[in-house]
Image (spheres, rainbow, N blue to C red):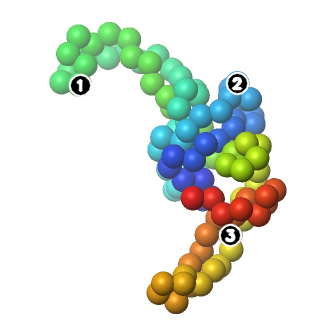
Amino acid sequence: MKIKKNDNVLVIAGNYAGKTGKVLKVFPKKNRVIVEGVNIRKRHTKPNQQYPNGGIIEKELPIDASNVMIIDNKTNEPTRIGKKIIIDEKTGKKKSVRISKASGEMLL
């Protein structure tokens, strides 16, 4: 999976198409991500330690990772992601990094 936690993404499909947000959690085995402010649902909860009063809680639910594109830091446009192998200067070991297809810049 090319999407990681704390990436800024644009939703390209579904009811929230066009919205941007930060990735809060990634589920690689299920190929799903939770994006801040996207796919918000209401959940009725009983009182518990986390919510002493209970009530109706709004929370983000996962969406498929294929419905989001990473936003390039340099151009602020959605972009595809590629992988490139570089040699680390300090240790001399090979390292795989993500690069933006549009600008060719490394993504951190």
Image location of residue 92, percent across then percent down: 52, 89
Number of numbered callouts drawn = 3
- Kindly identify which residue carries mark 3: 83
Name which residue type carries label 1: Gln
Query: Does the rendering let one see residue 21?
Result: yes
- Kindly identify which residue carries mark 2: 15
**Numbered disc 3: secondary structure:** strand
State the separation of the CA atoms marked 3 and 2.
Answer: 30 Å
Left or right of 107 in this view: 44: left
- Within 10 Å of disc 1 (Cα), the crowding (few <14, some 14-19, many 20+) is few
Image location of residue 18, percent across then percent down: 74, 29
- Kindly identify which residue carries mark 1: 50
| Residue at left offset 27%, top offset 13% | 54
In the rendered image, the quadrant that contains the N terminus is: bottom right
Query: Which quarter of the picture shows residue 46?
Result: top left
- Looking at marks 3 and 2 on the same chain, the residue that comes earlier in the sequence is marked by 2
Left or right of 28 in this view: 101: right
**Numbered disc 1: secondary structure:** loop
